[in-house]
Image (cartoon, coloured by chain):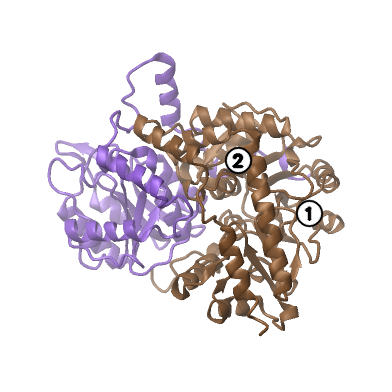
Chain colours: A brown, B purple
Amino acid sequence: MGDRPLLNRRLDGFGTTIFAEMSALAVKTGAINLGQGFPDTDGPEVVREAAVRALRDGRGNQYPPGPGVPELRTAVAEHQQRFYRLAFDPDTEVLVTAGATEAIAATMLALLEPGDEVIAFEPYYDSYAATIAMAGAHRVPLTLRAPDFRPDLDTLRDAITDRTRLLLLNSPHNPTGMVLTRDELTAIAELAVERDLIVVTDEVYEHLVFDGEHIPLISLPGMRDRTVSISSSGKTFSFTGWKVGWITAAGPLIAAIRTAKQFLTYVSAGPFQYAIAEALRLPDSYFTDFRASLAAKREILSDGLIAAGFEVYRPQGTYFITTDVAKLGEQDALAFCRSLPERCGVVAVPNSVFYDDREAGRSQVRFAFCKRTDVVEEAIRRLSQLRK
Amino acid sequence: MTAAAARPFLNAHLAEFGTTIFAEMSALAVRTGAINLGQGFPDTDGPESVREAAVRALRDGRGNQYPPGPGVPELRQAIAAHQQTRYGLPYDPDREVLVTAGATEAIAASLLALVAPGDEVVALEPYYDSYAACIAMAGGRRVPVTLRPDETGFRLDLDELRDAITDRTRLILLNTPHNPTGTVLTRAELTAIAELAVERDLLVITDEVYEHLVFDGEHIPLASLPGMRERTVTISSSGKSLSFTGWKVGWVNPLSHTRFATCA
């Protein structure tokens, strides 16, 4: 022990996440929490009752198999076939995880050696940086810049070195709502093939694309054997607390990632795995209606934020809107978000903390719209007081 | 050309940890229809009242969305009360209890947070395979102290433990009741370990998931011994005690007010 800090050097700086700080502020002040991205309404009753049946029938109450229950692996493979015409072998090419968070952690801890470089979009989800650090690797940010947050492909090309092990992509992108186009994905795929790189894609918002379409990178030429495709049930079915995620990838990649995964949680969420297997087979109308209801909330929140004086970067997907508060006379997103609950009873999250290049996101603030319509409207009413 | 083709997908730290023996043996059990006494999970679920508590939580909408990072307050308070009632150990439910995805995540998070590359971790062997893998992921080095059978069972040689500690030792990783030997460390053994930990200024992680399955003697948490409260990370879980191994609810009582980085 001695004088050495308890937390190791690799994780220095990752103490408390901004979500924990802002959610604690929300609780303390009673503010409306548009900071963290979880819905205030549970998903479909049929899915919840499927979990109740599994619990009562004794399915999943004891350790499920390490790779996940066969029912869920089969349902994931069917989902990939149904939505993207992608064929995966449920026995060797699907791995069930404790949410996308464990999928990302296991992938980084399995595939990276100390000293490797990982190129990732910024602003980035904070667990990307932390798990890259845990693996002893270095992150190389590719900055997405306002107003449209498109990746600069020349910059991406220049960022690749002989030490680059993998690209870590997220589309639809949290927090900016950017959705990669087919042209962009094609260019990224060509680069990955040319430089012989693995690409990890976080696609948890795959069913929340409002403009354009979600295209899994793994469907592009040359990518089937070098892409690790990650998704989860939390966002799509509005049961974020169940933590059921999955990876689809070629067998050798799955085998490597499973090695790390089995020592992180071993297995998880026994009965919920059966429930999500049923959820993935819901009719198309579920997915269409879910997207439509979030698209309507996107309109309400973006109109309201514009009226309240924010600069709004209209998202193509996800359930987040990134704004700029400079027009409100605010220069520092973190200070703004820390004062917002006291000033008007709303919690938001500063994008600036998701950048290494803090200048690029200095005055950007993210709001979530996965809340009841009346809650979103009340938040807008409160935010409109800011300029008064 | 860069990384992918020239290199195995799995990194060198984990190269020796392919498939667990449990996966191999359970697959054999399925293939042959043999009775599986290999893997440690019950074939009968735990109490109906516990199962129905889960059903009520689902239907009432408690926990269906992200619970707080450290765990829901109700569970943290229950864990603190359990430690107080059973062992007289006071823990602050807000700052000294962390809920995890089973003891496996608790061990992974503890080792990934506390061990830096090059550190040594002294662990009893035979050991649960995740210990070795998590030490490797953290870039640490495991130093085994072998439990050897005598007429009283598999005992810990305290001299061997003392000799295993070097200037690079970061922590001792203990497991009592011990899987797979069933050894339960005695008060005398625990006292000797505690004295050693204090003398050499070491952290100790104790895996106590079988705490309610001691048949001879008693389970004594190392954290209850003099000088150990502030240097012991106590890990347990509900799977073995309540016979719902598939739910994966575990917890950590860290040393005073430690912040942990959870890894998964």
Q: Position of residue B193 (x, y in %)?
A: 24, 57
The percent coordinates of residue A377 (x first, y second) are: 61, 66
Residue A50 in the image: above or below residue A361 = above
Measure the alpha-carbon separation of dots 1 and 2: 20 Å
Q: Residues within 10 Å of mark 2 (few under 14, many from 20)?
A: many
Residue drawn at (69%, 70%) of the image: A305
Report whether mark 1 lies on the same chain as mark 2: no
Residue under the image location 72 percent in, 84 percent down: A329
The correct choice, above or below, for A100 with respect to A385 in the image is: above
Residue with the most extreme left position: B217
The numbered disc on residue B10 is 2
Nearer to the camera, A279 or A356 = A279
Q: Position of residue A240 (x, y in %)?
A: 52, 50
Residue A175 seen by the camera: no
Which percent across, then down, holds residue B163?
A: 31, 55
Numbered disc 1: secondary structure: loop
The answer to whether any part of residue B159 appears in the image is yes
Q: Which residue is denoted by mark 1 in the rendering?
A: A161
Q: Quadrant of the N terminus of chain B?
A: top right
User: The residue tagged with tag 2: helix, strand or loop?
Assistant: loop
Q: Report the front residue among A370 and A163.
A: A370
